[in-house]
Image (cartoon, helix red, strand yellow):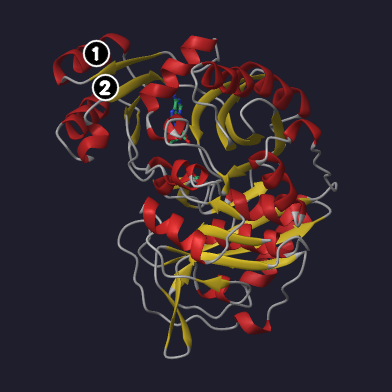
Amino acid sequence: MNILVLGGGGREHALAWAIKQNPKCDRLIVAPGNPGIAAIAECADLDILDRASVVTFCEENAIDFVVIGPEAPLAAGVADATRGAGILTFGPSAAAARIEASKAFTKELCAACGAPTARHARFTEAAPARAYIREQGAPIVVKADGLAAGKGVVVAETVDQALAAVDDMLGGAFGAAGAEVVIEEFMAGEEASFFVLTDGTTCLAIGTAQDHKRVGEGDTGPNTGGMGAYSPAPVLTEAIAAQALARIVQPCVDELARRGTPYQGVIYAGLMIADGEARLVEFNARFGDPEAQVLMMRLGAQALDLMLACAEGRLADAQVSWAEDHALCVVLAARGYPGTPETGSAIGGLDALPEDSRHMVFHAGTASRDGRLVAAGGRVLGVTARGDSLAEARARAYGLVDRIDWPGGFCRRDIGWRAL
Ligand code: AMP
Ligand code: GLY
C-alpha cells in the first residue's frame, strides 16, 4: 500500500522507519520529512495544516493510508478531511483531539467519567484566579488552556510564581491559548507515559516510556520538548498500567464515543504515579517525541499492522508482541537549546554508524546544505538503541553518541538515571 506520514521530526522518522520494515508498505511518502527520512522514504513539500492540500495530495498519489504525526494537523482537522474523503487515516478528529488541544476540556472529560486527576479550577479573569491561588497556597500548577508548544505549564513553588504565571498567561503571553487558565493541585510522584491505541471502542496498550524534560543533568534547568527517553518505564508496572487503562483511558474513550466524537488513534497519557496509584497529568493526541523513537524501536514492523487495525476498527482482534527488550534514546540538541539554538553547524560521523534493529539515529532538526548535514533546529538527532537490559541499551546509545562529530551540539549524559 501507499502510505503518507505527516510531519518531519524525530517522531516521524521513527514512524517511517518502523512502517518501512513492514512488507505491506509499497510506497512511503513523508511530508515534509527531513534528510534522515529522505534516506528511507520520499519527502514531499506539502502544507500539512491545509486540509484541502492534504486531501488533494492523497488523491494525486493514490495514498491508501495516512498517519498523522504531530498535534497541529490534528487540531486543524486534517484527519476529519482525509477520513471524509474516504482515505484510511490514523489520528483523531479535531473534536477528539481536544483531549490535547484544551486542558479545560480534558479536566471536564475526567470529571464526567470519574477518571482520577488533579483537583482544579478554571479562570478567564485574573482577580478570581489570584484569589484562588492565595487560598490554595503553593506548590500549585498554572496552565494555559490551549496548545502552547509545551511551554504553557508553570509548576509554581511559591504563590508569587503562580500569580506571575496567571498575569503572564491572561496578559496574552500565549495568545489565544492563554485566554483561559487551569489552576491545579500539585501532584507529587513519579511521572511516566502510557501509550494506548484505540479505534473508538477497544483500547490496546502498546507500551510505556519515561522522558527527561529538563535540559540539564539530574533533571535540572529549563523544560524542553524532551532530552531523552526510555521504554519500558519500570514505574508503570503491569498492575498500574492495567489500572490506568481501566480507570483513566477506557472511561475517557467511552465518554468521547458516548458524546458522538469517538477517538481513533494513539492516546498518550502522562501519568503521575504515587503509592501504587496513577492519576492523569495530561493527554496527548499523538505519539511523544522522543518517546516514539523508543517505542518504534521496540515495536518494529508490527507498528504498521497495529495502526492499520486501529484505523480500520479492528483493534479487538489485534495483539502486540513484545520482546523482553529495552530501548533508550539520547537527544542531541544544538547549543543554545531550549533558548535560541545555534543552527547551521556541520554534523559528521553518521555515515559510519550502524543502522539496524538495535541501533538507529533518528533525525529531527537537520537539513542538507551543499551536500553536508547541518543543524536546523533545537533538537537535532535522536540517538536510539535497543538491548536486553536498559543498561545495555544505554551503553549502546552513548556508544553511538560518542562517534558523532558535532561540536555544535550537546546532550545529557544521564538519560535513564532514574531507572538505573
Ligand atoms: P503538561 O504539559 O500538562 O504535561 O505539563 C508539563 C509538566 O508539568 C508535566 O510533565 C509535569 O511534570 C508537570 N505538571 C503538570 N501538571 C502537574 C501537576 N498537577 N502536578 C505536578 N506536576 C505537574
Ligand atoms: N516528549 C514529550 C512530548 O512529546 O510531548
User: Which residue is at a point 54% across and 27% down the rendered structure image?
Assistant: 262
User: Which residue is at a point 57% across and 46% down the rendered structure image?
Assistant: 89
- Residue 225, image x, y percentages: 45, 50
Establish if 158 lies above or below 396: above
Establish if 182 lies above or below 199: above
Marker disc for residue 159 = 2
Marker disc for residue 134 = 1
* 338 lies left or right of 12: left
Under mark 2, the amino acid is Val
Q: Secondary structure at mark 1?
A: helix
- Residue 410, image x, y percentages: 48, 67
The number of callouts visible is 2
- Residue 416, image x, y percentages: 65, 49
Residue situated in front as seen by the camera: 53 or 296: 53
Establish if 338 lies above or below 359: above
Ligand 1 within 8 angstroms of badge 2 C-beta: no
Report the image quarter containing ligand 1: top left
Q: Say if residue 44 shows up in the picture.
A: yes
Under mark 1, the amino acid is Arg
* 47 lies left or right of 172: right
Q: Residues within 10 Å of mark 2 (few under 14, many from 20)?
A: some
| CB under 8 Å between discs 2 and 1 | yes
- Residue 127, image x, y percentages: 14, 16
Ligand 1 within 8 angstroms of badge 1 C-beta: no
Q: Residues within 10 Å of mark 1 (few under 14, many from 20)?
A: some
Sequence order check, earlier mark of 2 and 1: 1
Q: Which residue is farthest bottom?
A: 370
Point out the image quarter for the N terminus. bottom right
Residue situated in front as seen by the camera: 168 or 373: 373
